[in-house]
Each structure stands twice: as C-alpha cells, then as structure tokens.
Amino acid sequence: MKYWLMKSEPDAFSVDDLAARPKKTEPWDGIRNYQARNFMRDDMKRGDLVFFYHSSCPQPGIAGIMKISKTAYPDETQFDESSKYYDPKATRANPRWLNVDVTLVKKTRLIGIQELRSHPQLASMQILRRGNRLSITPISEAEWQFIVSLIDA
DNA sequence: GCCAACGTTGGC
DNA sequence: GCCAACGTTGGC
C-alpha cells in the first residue's frame, strides 16, 4: 500500500465536489502529464491513500483524504471533442491517457502550504519544492503519518 | 499580474 | 537528437 498527493484546482473540482458525488467517487480525469500518468498506470493500487490538495487558489493546501477505488483505465475525456482534455492523437484502440477512480474518505481541516512548510519533517515533500508542477506525487509513510497527526492535532 | 520552473513542440 | 521557443503551472 502506497501514499500519494493529488492536486486539483478547487474552482474546477474541490473536495466538496467529491463529497457530493454518488458514493463520493469520481474518475480523476484530465491528467495530461506522462509522469503522473505512469504513477497511475504502474504504481497505484486499490486501497492506496491520497491527500486531496487544493492548488492555484486563495488557500492552497491539503483539504481531504481519499482512497484509490479503481485502478487505471482509459480517460474518457481524451475521446470527447467537446472536452478541454480532448486529444486528437488518442484512439480507443490506442488510448494515451488514463485515470483512476478516487473515493473520499473524509474532509479534513485545511492544512495550508505554509503550515506544511513550517515542519522540517516535511521538507523533502515534492509539493513544497520550488517550481513543482507535478499533479500526482508519492508521499512517504513517515510523511503520511506526520500529516495525519497534524490533521488530528 | 508576475515570474520561475519545467514539459512539450518542432525546425534543423 | 539538440535546443530554442512556447505554453502551462502555481505560489506569491
């Protein structure tokens, strides 16, 4: 079992949006970065735990905990010409992009990026590195446990 | 709105 | 296969 952090702009899709979905479950679609796709394809398993991170917003930070409820399968939006995620080079026979399904475990208090930065135990988190743009990053077990302890504090 | 970082594209 | 140009991300 692994731990992850996945970013979303809350204007587009927030933790409250996920909470409102049937079964609190949604495909995590629209990933158009190969490294992030490969994490989903190669490393994510059912039951893996994920921090839901709000980015590009007034209060960036961790806002919830999710779990992976379905492993990677082709992202429908790549075939949809009306979608902003449409990819003309993708075909059903040869899909380029994948998504997993995520299910909300719980909303958390917002752990802001400033709070995350204030803890030396978290200094090596990829999300805190300058210029980090990767929307899916692995989290170590120690980092996971530490952040969970912050949530409960 | 600024700007640093970095992935992608395309000409050669 | 190199690398400059360009586009996007995301914190501030």
Image (cartoon, coloured by chain):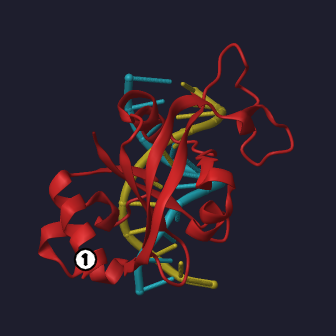
Chain colours: A red, B yellow, C cyan
Residue, far right: A82
x and y percentages locating residue A81 in the rendered image: 85, 38
Of the pair A112 and A18, the residue shown nearer to us: A18
In this view, A117 is above or below A35:
below
x and y percentages locating residue A122 in the rendered image: 19, 68
In this view, A65 is above or below A99:
below
- Residue at the spot 34% in from the left edge and 62% down from the top edge: A127
| Image quarter of the N terminus of chain A | top left
**Residue placed under numbered mark 1 in the picture:** A150
Residue, far front: A23
For label 1, the crowd category at 10 Å Cα-Cα, with few meaning under 14, some 14 to 19 and many 20 or more, is few
Q: Chain of mark 1?
A: A
Whether residue A29 is visible? yes
- Residue at the spot 62% in from the left edge and 44% down from the top edge: A29
Of the pair A14 and A20, the residue shown nearer to us: A20
Q: Quadrant of residue A118?
A: bottom left
x and y percentages locating residue A69 in the rendered image: 50, 41
Of the pair A99 and A102, the residue shown nearer to us: A102
Q: Is residue B2 left or right of residue A145?
A: right
Tag count in the figure?
1
Q: Is residue A79 left or right of residue A145?
A: right
Residue, far top: A93
Q: Is residue A145 left or right of residue A91?
A: left
Whether residue A87 is visible? no
x and y percentages locating residue A110 in the rendered image: 42, 79
- Residue at the spot 77% in from the left edge and 31% down from the top edge: A79
Determine the secondary structure under disc 1. Answer: helix
Type of amino acid at the residue the image marks with label 1: Leu
Q: Quadrant of residue A11?
A: bottom right
- Residue at the spot 60% in from the left edge and 55% down from the top edge: A24
